[in-house]
Structures are given as C-alpha cells and as structure tokens.
Amino acid sequence: MSVALLWVVSPTSEFSNGTVFLDSFRAVSKYKNLISNSNRLNNGHKKRRNFAMLENKSRFSVSNSMLATPAGEIALSSEQKVYDVVLKQAALVKRQMKKSSEDLEVKPDIVLPGTVTLLSEAYDRCREVCAEYAKTFYLGTLLMTPERRRAIWAMYVWCRRTDELVDGPNASHITPTALDRWEARLDDIFSGRPFDMLDAALSDTVTRFPVDIQPFKDMIDGMRMDLWKSRYKNFDELYLYCYYVAGTVGLMSVPIMGIAPESQATTESVYNAALALGLANQLTNILRDVGEDARRGRVYLPQDELAQAGLSDEDIFAGKVTDKWRNFMKKQIARARKFFDDAESGVTELSAASRWPVWASLLLYRQILDEIEANDYNNFTRRAYVSKPKKILALPLAYAKSLVPPSSKPSSTLVKT
C-alpha cells in the first residue's frame, strides 16, 4: 500500500499526530479567520456560465466553442467549460486587487504557543519532497520570496499526493470512494481542519493567498477519469482531461506566484497563459509516454485523429514506427508546441522572483518534444528525456528570460482593464 493511499484511508498515518497537532492548528486558523475573514474569497458560490471572450486573442470564438448534440441541442465544448473556470479564478484575484494592493501580500503570522514550530516543520517536509522529486523546479523556487516558495512547495506536495493516488505503485487499489474521501479532506484543508502535517502547510497557504478550491477539486475529477476512462474520442475530450490533471496546476499557481505590479496584461490573459503551460506539459507527457500507457491498456490520443491518419489502437499496441505514425506525431507535437508558445506571453507578466522556475519548466518540457523527434518518433520503446547537460544549459537561459520585465506598453493581446 502506497504512502498516498495510507494518507487517504488511514486515520493512523504517521502524520496524524493525535489531536494536539490538529487542535493547535485549528486554534491558529480560528484567529486568522477572525482577522482576515473580510478579505477571504468566497469559494462556495455556484459556477456561472460566462460567454465573454478574453481580451487577448483567444483560440476560440463563441460559435466554435459550442457543439451540437445528436438531438440538436447546443452543448459547451470542453474549452469553453475550462474557460469559465479561468474567468472565475481571474475575477477572484482582480476582486482582491481592487480592494487594496496590500491584500495580495502575505498576511502576518498569528503567534500561538507551538503553532509556529508545527507550521515550520510542515513546510520543511514539503520542501524536502519538492527537492527530491522536482529538483530543477525546486532550484528555481529558491529565488522566490520565502512566503511564496513555501506556498508553492505546499501546493506541489498536494498535487503530487493526488497524482500518486491513481498513478502510484498501488493505484489498482484506489476506488471512487477513496477519491471521495480525498476530496472531503480537501474541503477540510480549506476550512482550516488539516488531517496531517502536509495538509497543514496547504491549509495555511490558502489563508495567505487568494487561492480558490475549484482547480483542486477539478484535479481530483481528473483522477476520477483515470479510474474509468482509457480512450478519448476527440481532442475536445482530451483537452478537458489535460485541464483536470495539469491545467489546474497553472490556475493554482498564479495567485501564489503573483502578477508583476508593472504588468499591463489583463488578469484573464495571465491565467490563460498559465492554463496553456499546464496543457502543454500534459500533452508532452502523453506524447512521451505512449508506449508506457499502451502497456497499461491506455491510449491518451484522440481516436478520430488516429483514424484520420490511418491508425488505430492496434497500431499503437504493436509499437511499430511507420510513416503514418511519424506524420501523426508531427501534428501532435505541433499542437503541443503551440500551447507552449501561448504560455510564453504570460510568464513575463508574473512577479520577477517567480519567473525563473516557470521559465525553466517551460524550456525543459518543450525540449522533450525535440527528443521525441530525435528518437525518430519512437515513443513506444524509447522514453524521450532531456539529458543533464542540456538541463544545465537551459537554466541560465531560463534565468536570463526571467530578468526580462513585462512590457510597459499595452499590446493588442495583453491589455490591462
């Protein structure tokens, strides 16, 4: 049984140090809420459908974001559904920014006996996990302010634990009920009732930054999809899955990383770029892991596009690189690169101290696509990866890009309102 599974189903986890830890954290959360309640964002209102378009040039219009059902009804595309979430997240941050520029600053600690030490230990554990499993990203976070990097570590750990539920060594034992319990724990985290030390770090983070619960819940929905869905009939379906499991990370991160005060970009456009980076990363994961996923009976590629290329699941399970496969992969890689291109515009708009880890992630992940090409599109038996020397060379470039300030002139695609 994996550690992640134990955290979900076992009340005797090594991190549940009796009621002393929980009661202490509840106490500090109670006092924080008394101080910051007027500034807390409302996480409970229903999602509203909003058909307004982004101020920047979006990849879709109202007409092509809606699909006709066989019964002639109009249904929203996955891209429009996700866009509604983007609008909501951006609106939450804009509302906070309009109240006061100080609202986005980290709230002061409420010092109660024992709580500072407990929280410090909680964040230290998150740092250790991030340093072990995301070495390059961790290095970049060291340039961030202490408050922001601790928050990013806490968020990373929660995302990793969530992913491990369905992608870890004991994923076969995970049930929908286990994910329901994990979501209930998430509700408790946002309510100031952490179950264990790592939960406590995230619970503290969401009181300090305008982080909304919706992207976290959406990520759990992505894990639910992995329990029952192993085929995607078109890119619309795949887009929604990619948002759930990776685009959500971008939406979670923006409030923590912060938008540069001098940025002339709309909040919506920055969120849209963060979403694009998450989608690009996940599409790259999918293209890199075709063979590995096939051995588990999964095909994360649009079935209609496979058919158009003269391919089928049988061709993927056979694992033979053909001209048809090469041509298909070229189109898939081009799509992923387009999402990386869309993401670039938003990275520069982030706060200066937060740009390096994001640039590093973008540049290194995009290089995986280059490696797939270098392997002659054999992602059946060869796993594309970026070598350590190439990673080292990419870091100075990422740092140099992080020093480029946001444009002081409003552009046609990034205009602050």
Image: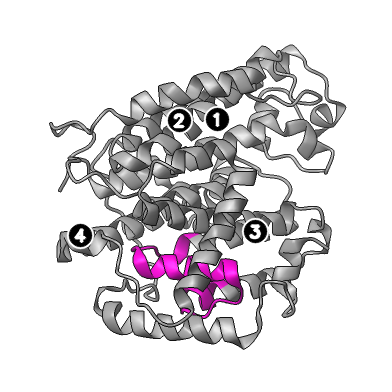
> Mark 4 or 2, which is nearer the eye?
4
Amino acid under disc 2: Phe
Residue name at image x 58 percent, y 49 percent: 130
Distance (Cα) linking label 3 and label 4:
31 Å
Q: Main secondary structure of the magenta part?
A: helix
Mark 1 → mark 2, Cα distance in angstroms: 9 Å
**Which label was assigned to residue 97?**
4
- Residue 255 seen: yes
Query: Are the two marked residues, 1 and 2, in contact with CB atoms closer than 8 angstroms?
Result: yes
Mark 4 vs mark 2, CA separation in Å: 28 Å
Query: Residue 297: where, in percent of width, then height?
Result: 82, 43
Q: In this view, does 5 lie above or below 37?
A: above
Q: Earlier in the sequence, mark 3 or mark 1?
A: 3
What residue range appears in magenta? 186-215
Q: Marks 1 and 4, how far apart in space?
A: 32 Å
Q: Where is 53 relative to 409, above or below?
A: below
Snapshot quadrant of residue 116: bottom left
Q: Where is residue 146 in the image (x, y as percent from the top left)?
A: 38, 53
Please report whichever mark, 2 or 3, sits nearer to the chain's N-terminal start: 3
Q: Is residue 191 left or right of residue 258?
A: right
Q: Residue at x 42, y 81 (%)?
A: 28
Spatial distance from mark 3 to mark 1, Cα to Cα?
A: 21 Å
Residue at the spot of label 1: 365
Farthest residue, direction left: 409
